[in-house]
Image (spheres, rainbow, N blue to C red):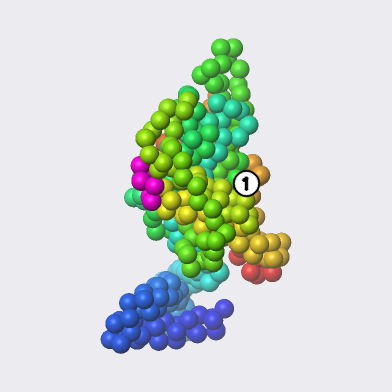
Amino acid sequence: MFERIEEIEIKHVELGDKVNDPEITADQKQWQKLMKEYSDLTPIVEKYKEYKAAKMSVEEALEMLNDTSDDEFKQLLKEELNENKEKVEILTDELNLLLLPKDPNDDKNVIVEIRGGAGGDEAALFASDLFRMYSKYAEGRRWKTELLSSNENDLGGFKEVSFMITGQGAYSRLKYESGVHRVQRIPTTESGGRIHTSTVTVAVLPEAEEVDIDLNMNDVRIDVFRSSGNGGQSVNTTDSAVRVTHMPTGIVVSCQDEKSQLKNKDKALKVLYARLYEIEQAKHDSEISEERRSQVGTGDRSERIRTYNFPQGRVTDHRIGLTLHKIDTILNGDLDEVINALITTDQAKKLKGSEE
């Protein structure tokens, strides 16, 4: 491990020289690429400096213990020695975590797709609740939310809704939300007071750039049509809605939330890029051995990941066995406790895998 860190230290110094080179700073594209690499290595280098300082303190305390006969001073040195030994262990664990392979998508923005599953109108209403939950979570982290497309039912719920969340590290935290979310509650339309179980599917896709996916526009059919709201009510009188069909895969994306045909087309293509990127990622992931694949946040949409039980006021994440009795605050966007627990479990499993 430490040989690798020393190589990183050398590379960090080299990159530091390069990003300050006037010839390189003149080429903004190259400078940004090198600056990102430099920034990615900086936390490892800084943590290693802390580790070396703690390690040196251990060695100095041991040396002084051998050279002194003063019992009171010895006691102080032993306390300092134990403190620094503990610090060395903690810093070693932190360095191991920093050296874990980073998900290349972690810094990307995300496209979130929410679809009502089993449960009809009740599932659509809960899809709306989840849309609000993620919007509030994004707001709390000062991320930007932009609606891409939506299909509402008569009760104000969403049969499906897709939106983009833009912000540093959005994918690194929201990727754990992909899967089936189950809700147990008494619907407002239920006169007998019976608890119903409904499901909603969430897909979290990293935003894909054109450079990530080689899309041949000859494989894409673009149709325009007139936007319509609930019950066929006209939203506008021009053919501004756009339907994009990727013929090789059969993926269809419709967007009609903007009054501009061009904006709807851009949004639909963003979703298409993200879905095609997800297919490529799935192919890549299937080639990774089962032992090394993370067990948390697999992104499998058929996997039931969480239950929201309203009568008991609880939220249970089935992947890590976490139950929290604060359904209202979670649905109001307070997701950090759940996401932090998922990240910790994920990192622990990856660390265990790297040691085997």
Q: Residues within 10 Å of mark 1 (few under 14, many from 20)?
A: some
**Which residue is labeled 1 in the image?**
301
Q: Can residue 248 be seen at all in this image of the molecule?
A: yes
Q: For this rendering, which residue is in front, 145 or 305?
A: 145
Quadrant where the C terminus lies?
Answer: bottom right
The picture places residue 79, in percent across and down from the top left corner, at 45, 69
Q: Callout 1: helix, strand or loop? A: loop
Q: Quadrant of residue 290?
A: bottom right
Provide residue 114's location: percent of width, then percent of height.
52, 41
**Which residue appears at 61% of the width and 28% of the height?**
119
Depth check: give the residue in front, 206 or 183.
206
Q: Which residue: 56% across, 48% down?
A: 252
Give the residue at x 58% y 40%.
Answer: 201
Farthest residue, direction right: 290
Dot 1 amino acid type: Arg
Above or below, comparing residue 104 to residue 21 in the picture: above
Magenta range is: 258-263
